[in-house]
Image (cartoon, grey):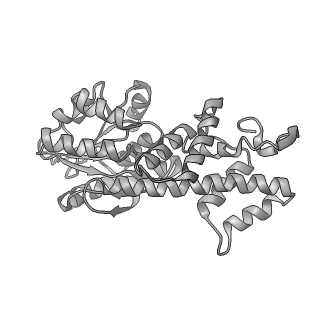
Amino acid sequence: MSVDGREGAGQPRVAVLGVGTMGAGMVRNLVRSGLSVDVWNRTPGPAAALAEDGAHVHADPALAVGSADVVITMLGDGAAVRSVMLGQGALAAMKAGAIWAQMGTIGVGPTDEMIAAVAAQRPDVTFVDAPVSGTRQPAEAGQLLVLAGGPESARVPLEPVFGAVGQATRWLGEAGAGTRFKLITNAWLFFLIEGAAEIMALADSLGVSREAVLGLLGQGRMASPVAAGKAAKMDSGDDSPDFSMQWAVKDVGLAIDAAPGRALTALEAIRDRWQSLVDQGMGELDTSAARHGFERTGGAASLRMAGAPGG
């Protein structure tokens, strides 16, 4: 940790690899909290934009992590993490005693693979899996929920880092536990989003006012703030991305893959329907785009919910 009186003195230096929608918000909050932050992104534009916020931008992931006490990976999937940390040498470039906090949602298999790689190649590095629950707005506001798995020794060093990006951290056990719990929370989220979309479509068919439905979702014993918020976004025709459909399809697939031999038929149906929306060009839209695709049967006019993206 830096003790020379400059930026981040007495605090861990952090490297963030992957600064898309979520990673960029996390970087800004880390910088605002007074930490020194190095960043790298596969496409340089998003990383370069963070230089104006005070981040130190690097053209190579191995260079980005060389001075870091904590390395955060916020990459799209397991293949990207494997490529950056193993293929491009970022793990090898980490300094002895550093902590690798793997905070993207990459699934059980890739997480276990990275745990094994650290044990075999860099036993002097501590691996923590710490995927976050939340979307663009919580990431920008530093209000994510961190779901962490790792050794007790990592908790105190990570407090200023997780405290900067999240409103709370839940330590769930050994490395790998955070990822497993994240798949459960994501699955519940997907049920709520699809449920909101189908309830709104049913209300349209029955002639029930959407205002009444939004009230049902937002108040009383059947209330769900998440479902109500997403339903309100659907009702307004807002598909601006907080959590894009293409990444949601990836994540629901990770949940299904984590339970081989079990018939998770509702999750499979959600994955298949949402994949069809991605195939229609809606992959970069928010999961509120689940409102699309509810055409009336018999060739009647499409429901309002099934209009063009964003309308």
Residue at 37% in and 35% down: 18
- Figure check: 44 above or below 274: above
Seen from this angle, which residue lies furthest bottom?
221
Q: Is residue 112 left or right of residue 287?
A: left
Seen from this angle, which residue lies furthest front?
261
Counting from the top left corner in percent of width and height, residue 114 is at 25, 42
Counting from the top left corner in percent of width and height, residue 60 is at 28, 25
Residue at 31% in and 57% down: 177
- Indicate the quadrant where residue 217 lies: bottom right
Residue at 63% in and 34% down: 282
Judge whether residue 100 can be spotted in this image. Answer: yes
Q: How many marks?
A: 0
Quarter of the figure that contains the C terminus: top right
Judge whether residue 142 can be spotted in this image. Answer: no
- Figure check: 126 above or below 244: below
Counting from the top left corner in percent of width and height, residue 150 is at 24, 56
Counting from the top left corner in percent of width and height, residue 310 is at 71, 38
Q: Is residue 109 left or right of residue 70?
A: right
- Indicate the quadrant where residue 6 lies: top left
Residue at 61% in and 53% down: 193
